[in-house]
Image (cartoon, helix red, strand yellow):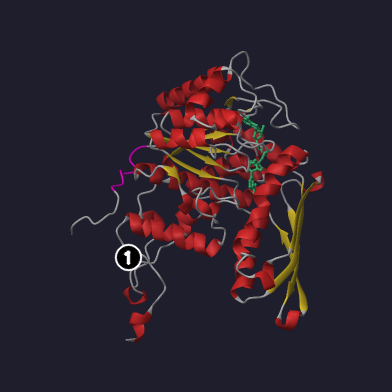
């Protein structure tokens, strides 16, 4: 049969290196999860790449292969992880401290987890006020740090023999800041690295090092990193993919499930109040107003974009939306979220919906991290460069082209993701029209 693929996808041969700045709750849950799955101690629940299928052709054809059989993805057995962190704990010790997974499971994984030791971090407390740690690079310019990260990447490749790499930020949320003059062009940015420009954050140094090494970069946190002209330019020049921002794991995931449903029935909204308590280190970092501001901005935009008040002024023009996160240590990683939704129906009669989500932050985020790195590697092998909007499904504040608005509706995002996979493999896109069944 002739190959009708729309893009040539290089095979997933050899090992995939996953480079992660930040080895806290999510990263250790991800690494421990991979090791547990390899040993048959658990299943990759929550991961579309591992458990999802993709329907092909007409409903009468009965073709629904597993996604991982349909497109060539790296296997979990072939993933090698390398991390940077400001603390010296190895992945076993960090996982015990994070308190997400139970000790008897971690004991069984102690050997592989203890072998993952964090490299020295690029860190600047101005960007994460509530943290400080000993395992950090010192005595250089920002450009020196970028070069040291590139050295780390090269040594990791040599040591492990990985064939390909992708980077994903899973470090703390940096304080809110906007693109400055130094982010305007790649030349400005490189000059800023040399001159230690205060507007260049640690996450941007890692991202620069990755992109400059020809490695894709995804952002699991909400702060500004590759969404600047300088780093977008670098990604395009180097032909590498970028994606972000901020894993859509808990409360915002719920929001983007419910809001499209209310809108589909033309039910109005007076207000949506979301609050949650969490007691892990992420909660502690977000207790700082600067870091919280990054999160607030990322969490706030979904409703406005989904409900489109400009098109439906009677229903969604003036709703009140508030998002709070409260640091409450006793709960650790077991976050509890509450949503109070004031809606209205026929003739404006008010109603309420309450959601009480007792979730586990890192249990929800780890499978997203796995899917993102496997799809980023796929994108890179398929020669897809720049912003990967088809991965919006995974993010609270999806990166998008400047002339379009971001797509937040989780159902549209999933359709877009699967249609992208179909498109890659030259299969018909699914429109759900379905008139042909009734001819
Ligand atoms: N868990 C979720 O559901 C979820 C959802 C969306 C976004 N996120 C984001 O993912 C990130 C990770 O979450 P987490 O719960 O694992 O947090 P965490 O606090 O447990 O881990 C973050 C780690 O990053 C390290 N770190 C901070 N700055 C660093 C730097 N410059 N270089 C290297 N390491 C650095 C910290 O020392 C810490 O170990 C956070 O930014 C969080 O906001 C998490």
Q: Residue at x 72, y 51 (%)?
A: 334
Find residue 134 and report its image quarter.
top right
Q: Is residue 17 visible?
A: no
Q: Residue at x 68, y 73 (%)?
A: 314
Q: Residue at x 73, y 52 (%)?
A: 335
User: Ligand 1: which quarter?
Assistant: top right
Q: Nearer the viewer, residue 191 or 310?
A: 310
Residue 299: x, y in percent? 67, 52
For the C terminus, give its image quadrant: bottom left
Q: In the displayed structure, does residue 379 sit left or right of residue 6?
A: right
Residue span colored magenta: 8-14
Q: Is residue 403 above or below residue 148?
A: below
Q: Residue at x 62, y 13 (%)?
A: 139
User: Few, some or many C-alpha atoms within 10 Å of disc 1 (few <14, some 14-19, many ≥20)?
Assistant: few
Disc 1 secondary structure class:
loop
Residue 255: x, y in percent? 65, 61
State the residue lying farthest toward the bottom. Answer: 439
Q: In the displayed structure, does residue 34 sit left or right of residue 63?
A: right
Residue 359: x, y in percent? 69, 56
For the N terminus, give its image quadrant: bottom left
Assess mark 1: CB under 8 A from ligand 1?
no
369 drawn magenta: no
The residue that label 1 is drawn on is 428
């Amino acid at each position: 049969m002739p190959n009708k693929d729309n893009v040539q996808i290089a095979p997933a041969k050899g090992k995939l290196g996953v480079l992660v700045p930040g080895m806290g709750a999510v990263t250790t849950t991800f690494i421990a999860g991979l090791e547990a799955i390899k040993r048959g101690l658990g299943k990759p629940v929550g991961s579309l790449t591992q458990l999802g299928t993709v329907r092909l052709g007409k409903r009468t054809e009965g073709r629904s292969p597993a996604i991982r059989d349909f497109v060539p993805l790296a296997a979990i057995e072939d993933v090698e992880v390398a991390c940077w962190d400001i603390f010296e704990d190895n992945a076993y010790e960090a996982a015990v401290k994070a308190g997400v997974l139970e000790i008897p499971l971690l004991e069984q994984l102690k050997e592989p987890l203890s072998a993952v030791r964090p490299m020295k971090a690029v860190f600047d407390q101005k960007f994460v006020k509530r943290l400080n740690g000993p395992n950090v690079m010192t005595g250089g310019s920002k450009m020196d740090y970028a070069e040291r990260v590139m050295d780390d990447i090269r040594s990791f490749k040599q040591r492990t023999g990985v064939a390909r790499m992708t980077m994903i930020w899973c470090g703390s949320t940096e304080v809110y800041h906007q693109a400055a003059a130094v982010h305007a062009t790649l030349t400005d940015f490189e000059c800023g690295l040399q001159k230690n420009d205060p507007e260049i954050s640690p996450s941007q140094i890692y991202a620069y090092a990755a992109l400059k090494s020809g490695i894709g970069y995804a952002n699991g946190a909400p702060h500004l990193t590759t969404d600047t002209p300088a780093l977008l330019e670098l990604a395009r020049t180097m032909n590498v993919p970028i994606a972000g921002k901020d894993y859509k794991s808990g409360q915002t995931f719920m929001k983007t499930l419910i809001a499209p449903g209310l809108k589909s029935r033309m039910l109005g909204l007076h207000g949506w109040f979301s609050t949650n308590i969490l007691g892990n280190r992420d909660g502690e970092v977000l207790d700082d107003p600067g870091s919280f501001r990054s999160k607030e901005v990322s969490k706030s935009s979904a409703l406005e974009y989904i409900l489109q008040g400009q098109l439906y002024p009677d229903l969604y023009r003036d709703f009140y939306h508030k998002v709070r996160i409260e640091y409450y240590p006793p709960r650790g990683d077991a976050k509890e979220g509450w949503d109070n939704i004031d809606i209205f129906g026929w003739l404006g009669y008010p109603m309420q919906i309450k959601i009480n989500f007792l979730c586990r932050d890192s249990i929800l985020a780890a499978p997203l991290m796995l899917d993102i790195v496997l799809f980023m590697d796929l994108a890179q092998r398929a020669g897809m460069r720049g912003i990967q909007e088809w991965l919006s499904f995974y993010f609270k504040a999806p990166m998008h082209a400047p002339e379009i608005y971001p797509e937040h509706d989780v159902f549209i995002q999933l359709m877009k993701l699967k249609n992208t996979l179909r498109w890659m493999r030259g299969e018909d896109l699914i429109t759900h029209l379905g008139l042909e069944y009734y001819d």
